[in-house]
Image: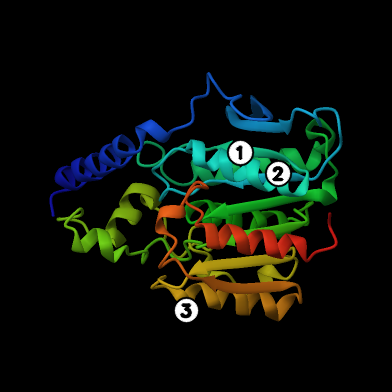
Amino acid sequence: MDDKLIKEQIFNITKQAREEMKDHLIDYNNLSKSPFIERVREIPRHKGRVKVIFGQHVDAVDQKRPLLINIHGGSFIRPGTERDLWFCQALAEEFGMHYVHIIYSLSPEHPYPLAAKECYSAIHFILGASELYHTKQDSIYIVGREAGANLALGVVQKLCSRNLPKPARLILDSPIMDVSMRIRKDHVDAGKIPLLSEKLFYQLAYVGEHDAVDPILSPSYMNPLAIGAFPPTLILEPDTNIHHQMTLGLAVKLKMTTRDIKYCDYDVEDDENLDITGGYHKSSYDQIVEYLSQTNDF
């Protein structure tokens, strides 16, 4: 297959995906449309800065509260949407939290490892500067969906391997476990990817020239010994996920090294039109609420 044709198709797919959701993207110039005060902050990193949105309830701006860090999904190519912020706000309202939404660089313009490095830099900084976010180091929670869950797993792997502070809990919804094998059959059947298999799309658009079996890129290749220090973790996936065994495999590896692991799937059959939370189905959101409600954290 001609390399130029492949690159053109990658950018065409990306352009189309972003165009289809342009009316739902976050308006950074008009963030305060809710009971939450939201501000864009810049976090320093080795090269450049990472932008995040920091949200606090209007009645709790100066209060010290638990902190939710959200890493949005979107196949590594989609920006965050207003629904991502609604998801953060809903959980923040439910449990009295502040929240941070990470604005990471997107593929194919910025392939791996930039997004992974940005998420790591942002979370590492926040964990070490919790006072700036009116929280405590042991009250910081990371939640990610799909590509965001993949990035969250990469961040936590690094934190654990370097014996650095880590989040209190990790919540993963439909994590991409293997970037070389993530296939959305509906896209292929609909002819949206006429030349590329989605396997190639991920490899070329996000992975680039890197080895797809790198455990930071593809967490299904993680060594169980490397995840012994993982925080308590909730793993969710829809019952339609064709890579069920990979996600379940992660739960098994985690269970081998720590006791506080919960794995569950959820039914999306009657839930498609209730996708009001940035890609999180209502049923998965309800599972997250139930999980956090059963902890002694709040």
Q: Residue at x 20, y 56 (%)?
A: 196
| For marks 3 and 2 on the same chain, the one whose residue lies earlier in the sequence | 2
Distance CA(mark 1)–CA(mark 2): 12 Å
Q: Amino acid at mark 1?
A: His
Secondary structure at numbered mark 2: helix
The answer to whether one can see residue 281 in this image is yes
- Density class for disc 1 (Cα within 10 Å; few <14, some 14-19, many ≥20) is many
Q: Quarter holding the C terminus?
A: bottom right
Q: Is residue 264 left or right of residue 188?
A: right
Q: Position of residue 151 (x, y in %)?
A: 55, 52
Kindly indicate the quadrant of the structure image that contains residue 41: top right
Q: Residue at x 20, y 53 (%)?
A: 192
Q: Residue at x 83, y 46 (%)?
A: 137
Kindly indicate the quadrant of the structure image that contains residue 248: bottom right
Picture layout, residue 286 above or below residue 249? above
* Residue at the spot of label 3: 245
* Residue at the spot of label 2: 92
* Residue at the spot of label 1: 101
Picture layout, residue 36 above or below residue 144? above
Secondary structure at numbered mark 1: strand
Q: Residue at x 39, y 43 (%)?
A: 77
